[in-house]
Image (spheres, grey):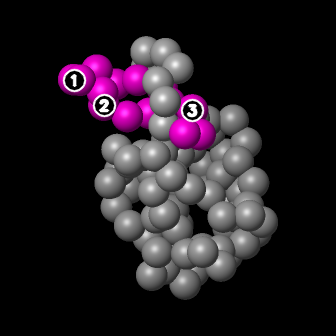
Amino acid sequence: MDYSHKDFTGQCLIERTDLNGQTITGSCFSHEVPDTHIFPDDMTGVTFINCNLDNCFIPDGNIVQDGSQRRYMNIDGVDMLVDADNQPIGAL
C-alpha cells in the first residue's frame, strides 16, 4: 500500500505488515493522546517526510524528516504543548 499523501488521523496501523522500508511523504497520522502507539513496535526503515506525527510514538530504527512531531494535550479546554512528563509548556 502507498501511505503517502493520505489522512490516517486517529487510525491505528499497528497490525500492518507492509510498512518496513517505506518512504512516506505528506501524510497525517495525528492522534489526541501523547505517545500513542499506532505503528508496529518492530517497524524499521521507514522514512517519514513532511508528515504530521503529532502525539505518535515512532519506534527506534525509523527516520522523521521535517513535518510535525508535537506532543500536546487538551487541558481545561485548551490544546497545550506538553513535555515528556505531560506537563504544559505552552499553547499549541
Asked if the magenta segment contains residue 78, the reply would be yes
Q: Residue furthest left?
A: 77
Q: Earlier in the sequence, mark 1 or mark 3?
A: 1
Identify the element where label 2 is drawn: strand
Q: Which residue is mark 2?
A: 74
The one of 8 and 90 positioned closer to us in this rendering: 90
Q: Quadrant of residue 76?
A: top left
Q: Residue at x 34, y 61 (%)?
A: 11
Disc 3 residue type? Answer: Asp
Q: Are marks 1 and 2 in contact (CB under 8 Å)?
A: yes
Identify the element where label 3 is drawn: loop
Does residue 72 appear to the left or right of 89 in the view shown? left
Asked if the magenta segment contains residue 26, the reply would be no
16 shown above or below 5: below
The one of 43 and 21 positioned closer to us in this rendering: 43
Give residue 18's position: percent from left, percent from top: 57, 80
Q: Residue at x 49, y 30 (%)?
A: 87
Q: CA distance from mark 1 to mark 2?
A: 6 Å
Q: Which residue is mark 1?
A: 77
Q: CA distance from mark 1 to mark 3?
A: 18 Å
Identify the element where label 1 is drawn: loop
Disc 1 residue type? Answer: Gly
Mark 3 surroundings within 10 Å by alpha-carbon count, few (fewer than 14), some (14 through 19), many (20 or more): some
- State the extent of the magenta-drawn residues as a range: 70-85
Q: Which mark is residue 83?
A: 3
Q: CA distance from mark 2 to mark 3?
A: 13 Å
66 shown above or below 35: above
User: Residue 52: in sight, yes or no?
Assistant: no
Mark 2 surroundings within 10 Å by alpha-carbon count, few (fewer than 14), some (14 through 19), many (20 or more): some
Q: Earlier in the sequence, mark 2 or mark 3?
A: 2
Q: Are marks 2 and 3 in contact (CB under 8 Å)?
A: no
